[in-house]
Amino acid sequence: MALTTNYLGLKLKNPLIASASSLNSRLDNIRRLEDAGVGAIVLPSVFQEQIEAEADEVSCRVDAYAESSPEAQSYFSGAIANPYGMGPDSYLNLVRRARAAVGVPVIASLNGSSRAGWTDFARLIEQAGASALELNMYHVPTDLLESGQVIEARYSEIVEAVCGTVALPVAVKLTPYLSSIGHFAEQLVGRGAAGLVLFNRLLEPDIDLLRMKLTDRLDLSEPEEMRLPMLWIAILSGRTKASLAASTGVSDVDGVVKYLLAGADAVMTTSALLRHGVGYMSTLVDGLRTWMEEREIASLDDMRGMMSWLRSRDQSVYSRANYIRILGHYAAP
């Protein structure tokens, strides 16, 4: 029974990846994930705003004191915390310690929406020993004058700049709200992206009617949210040279299997681990092995993409024809 898979040119012992979350900021959890059989670990993101804030603070301090004491420059360091309680220096230290603590690949994560600060810090992440780098493109286009072309061009420039700076394999975590996902995905691959993570969830606010204010509660993803990323993984599988990682909605082994059948090279989960603890990773790995054994499937290669667009007997299930067919057969209660 072979659970091994290739993701970003890295050979993983299985396709299960612990995606970026607060759990992965602790070294004891990182070790426990390896003990539970995880294939790879994505560290929590360091944020563009954090990198820029540190650079601004250092610049201000240097400008203020450099004339009085040139040696003072060596004492300046940013200490602005990000949501996980880590500044850039602490993040780089986490990368080093995680790589020393476990044998599975450790993937660093950069979160932002513009080019500023990314390339320099990507180089530092590479020097710290990360196995790969994930670029988390999170941007809500609130500017009504900003076109989709402008946004996608900026993302492409970021990917090209980072990939041109480091030798690390780079994955891009995409939002589903793009004009043509398949075309844009291929543009990113042409700019150097080795992998695509589908998808990043936008955190939408809700309205508290009692207090008449916006709320920003974080809700963990649910299995029904799998359908959109599963659709695009199925469409892209076998048609792009990039590795495909599924993200969102994995709560049990059924979700893992569905993503693999659609064509994912790797399956990421955070919500399941936050709900059940890092030890739940072993349940997912063992469950996948059992599912394959019961069906006498010898390797992931034998099942990956079995339900993809490319291998489907009826490709219309992924197109407008199926949309019309579903509506035509729907019976109202």
Image (cartoon, rainbow, N blue to C red):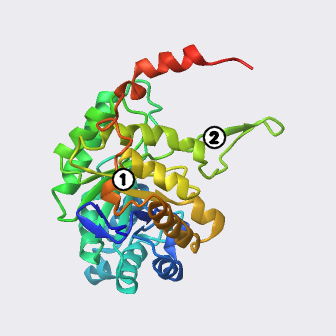
Question: Is 252 left or right of 217, judged from the image as shown?
Answer: left
Q: Nearer the viewer, residue 66 or 73?
A: 73
| Whole-percent x, y for residue 61 in the image | 37, 69
Q: Secondary structure at mark 2?
A: loop
CB-based contact (under 8 Å), mark 2 and mark 1: no
| Whole-percent x, y for residue 8 in the image | 26, 60
- Which quadrant of the structure image shows residue 96? bottom left
Question: Is 322 left or right of 234, judged from the image as shown?
Answer: right
Q: Nearer the viewer, residue 287 or 87?
A: 287
How many dots with numbers?
A: 2
The amino acid sitting under disc 2 is Pro
The numbered mark at residue 303 is: 1
Q: Nearer the viewer, residue 5 or 100?
A: 5
| Quadrant where the C terminus is found in the figure | top right
The numbered mark at residue 205 is: 2
| Whole-percent x, y for residue 102 in the image | 39, 82
| Whole-percent x, y for residue 115 in the image | 29, 49
The numbered mark at residue 268 is: none
- In this rendering, is residue 255 above or below 155? below
**Is label 2 or label 1 in front?**
1
Q: Nearer the viewer, residue 231 or 80?
A: 231
| Quadrant where the N terminus is found in the figure | bottom left
Residue drawn where x is 64% and y is 67% of the image: 276
Residue drawn where x is 23% and y is 54% of the image: 194
Q: CA distance from mark 2 to mark 1?
A: 39 Å
Residue drawn where x is 17% and y is 65% of the image: 167
Mark 2 or mark 1: name the one nearer the start of the chain.
2
The amino acid sitting under disc 1 is Met
Question: Is 152 left or right of 296, judged from the image as shown?
Answer: left
- Which quadrant of the structure image shows residue 301? bottom left
- Which quadrant of the structure image shows residue 292? bottom left
